[in-house]
Amino acid sequence: MTWVDSHCHVHDERIPDGSDGAVAAAAAAGVTTLITVGCDRETSLAAIAVAASHPGVHATVGLHPHDAVQGIDTIVDLLDTPGIVAVGEAGLDYFYDHSPRDVQQRVFAEQIQLALDRRLALVIHSRDAWDETFAVLADVGMPERTVFHCFTGGPDDARRALDIGAMLSFSGIVTFKGAPEVQAAAALCPLDRMLVETDSPYLAPVPHRGSTNRPAWVPHVGQFIADLRDVPVTDIAAATSANATTFFALA
C-alpha cells in the first residue's frame, strides 16, 4: 500500500529532520510521492531544489493569495523549469486579507490563465471566499485539472466544486472533531475525484494534532476517510494515488 501526499511544503525549514529526513521518513511510511508546493518566488525555488534532489518529489510554482501583492512577474519564469507539475497554490483568502482583495482576484485570474496556457494543473487555496473563487474560475475558465487543496467547505461547497469538474483534496482537518462539515464532504466525494494531503508543516492529523506535520502522516488522513466511508483503507490509498498520478501527469 503506497500513498501520494498531494500537497505539502517539504522544502519548508520547519519540516522535522529537514527535507531529506522527511522524504526518507515518508518513504518508510509508504508515502512514495510528494507534491511540494510553492507560495512565492523563494518557496517555489526551494520546492524546485528539493524536487531536483529526490525522484519521488515534484514541485509546483505559485503565488499564494497572502503574497499576491508581489505580482506574477516574480514567479512566471520559474514555470519554464522542467518538471513543474502545477501552478499554485493560487486563490483567494478573505480570512486574513494579507493582500487587498482586488489584487488577490487579479493575481488568481492571472495564474489560472498561466495554467490554461501551459496546460498545467491548478492548485487552489480558497478560504472564506467560495463565491468569489467560483466567480473568478467562471470568468477566466477552469483548467481541466483543478484541485481545491485542503478542502475546508461543507457538502454544498463540495458539490459546487465537483459539478464544475474539480478535484477535492483532504488534509488533516478532516480528522478534527470540530470539522463535521469537512467530514460530510469527504463522505460524499466520489473516490475518483479525491486526493489526500498533509499540507505539512501545518495541520497535523489526529493522533498527532498540535505537532509539526510531516508527509509521513498522510496515511492517517487516508485511514480516517476509510473509516468514515466504511471501506478498506487500501481502497483510499489506491484511488487517491492513481488520481494524483493522473492529475499531476506523473506517468
Image (cartoon, helix red, strand yellow):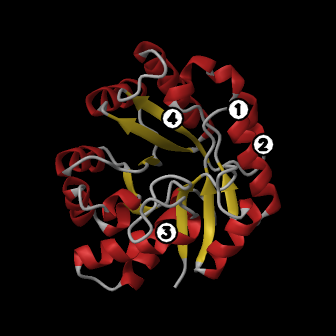
* Picture layout, residue 75 above or below residue 14: above
Coordinates of residue 43 in the picture (x, y in percent): 69, 40
Q: Name the residue under label 2.
A: 81
Q: Residue at x 54, y 56 (%)?
A: 200
Give amino acid for label 4: Ala
Residue identified by numbered label 4: 90
Q: Which of marks 1 and 2 is nearer the N terminus?
A: 1
- In terms of image quadrants, where is residue 125? top left
Find numbered disc 1 in the image and state the secondary structure of the residue it sits on: helix
Residue 123, above or below 135: below
Alpha carbons under labels 1 and 2: distance apart? 13 Å
In three-dimensional space, the C-alpha distance between marks 3 and 4, rounded to whole angstroms, equals 22 Å
Q: Earlier in the sequence, mark 4 or mark 2?
A: 2
Of labels 3 and 2, earlier in sequence is: 2
Q: What residue lies at 57% left-to-right and 56% top-to-bottom?
A: 248
Residue assigned mark 3: 218
Question: Callout 3 environment at 10 Å: few (<14), some (14 to 19), or many (20+)?
Answer: many
Q: Which amino acid does label 3 sit on?
A: Val
Q: How far apart are marks 1 and 4 (CA)?
A: 13 Å
SS at mark 2 in the image: loop
Toward which corner of the image does residue 100 lie, by quadrant?
A: top left
Q: Which of marks 4 and 2 is in front?
A: 4
